[in-house]
Image (cartoon, helix red, strand yellow):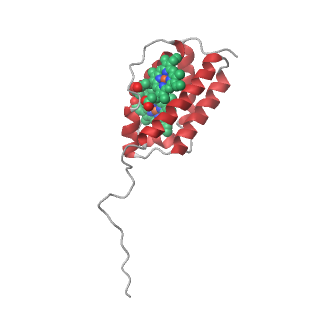
Amino acid sequence: MGDIETRQDCERLVRAFYGRALDDPIIGFLFRDVAKLDLEAHVPRITSFWETILLGARSYGGGAFAPHAALHMKAPLRRAHFEQWVSLWTRTVDELFAGERAELAKAHARRVANAFYARVQTLPDPVAEPAGLVVTRHVPR
Ligand code: HEM
Ligand code: HEM
């Protein structure tokens, strides 16, 4: 088993990951039903993201967090979702590649997932109680 060497390797990894993520019982609905992910439009961008991180390509322009903030406002992203994302990614990397870049792919995904999770927690929680609504109990004395 070889390491991640080319953009084509990055794309292979990304496609294998989404093949799994879209069917996943914990996070699949976020891509399919909430984001209505257009996979063919998404694959080149996410491939560029990994090509930039792993191969130094500079093909990705940044701003990766924004779509996740938008997603969170439609369906709150919880720690368990990020944990599942990282778990599927780690398994996919390990199945296809081995080496320094494969390790970096797993480590960086964990860092980004932690950072994204911390950032969504600073956003309003779309399912939290509105601040103005106070639930009271009225019982006769
Ligand atoms: C080979 C070196 C690295 C490259 C090319 C790289 C590249 C990137 C890119 C392209 C992003 C997405 C930024 C965005 O979309 O705005 C990112 C995010 C991030 N990286 Fe790296 N990275 C590298 C090393 C590291 C290291 C060494 C760490 C930590 C020890 C790290 C931690 C993070 C974190 C926490 C984020 C998420 C930031 C956020 O949006 O909240 N990266 N990185
Ligand atoms: C609960 C976990 C996550 C979910 C549900 C999720 C879902 C999504 C969705 C729906 C999009 C927008 C797709 C589109 O319509 O174009 C997206 C974009 C993206 N995601 Fe995630 N994501 C998660 C975690 C992560 C993590 C941990 C990383 C990085 C390691 C990541 C990297 C990216 C990047 C680079 C983009 C493309 C942003 C752009 O268009 O420039 N995601 N994600």
Q: Position of residue 102 (x, y in %)?
A: 62, 20
Mark yes or no: residue 13 visible: yes
Q: Position of residue 70 (x, y in %)?
A: 36, 39
Query: Looking at this view, is 51 or 104 the one in front?
Result: 104
Query: Looking at this view, is 141 or 83 the one in front?
Result: 141
Residue at the far right: name it. 1
Residue 13 location, quadrant: top right
Query: In the picture provided, is 134 more to the left or to the right than 104?
Result: left
The quadrant the N terminus occupies is top right
Q: Position of residue 58 (x, y in %)?
A: 43, 13
Q: Which residue does the image show at 40% across and 32% down from the upper left?
A: 65
Residue 54 location, quadrant: top right
Residue at the far left: name it. 132
Is 83 above or below relative to 6?
below
Residue at the far bottom: name it. 141
Query: In the picture provided, is 106 more to the left or to the right than 136?
Result: right
Q: Which residue does the image show at 56% across and 44% down from the upper left?
A: 25
The quadrant the C terminus occupies is bottom left
Q: Position of residue 116 (x, y in %)?
A: 46, 35
Mark yes or no: residue 46 visible: no
Query: Looking at this view, is 107 or 69 the one in front?
Result: 107
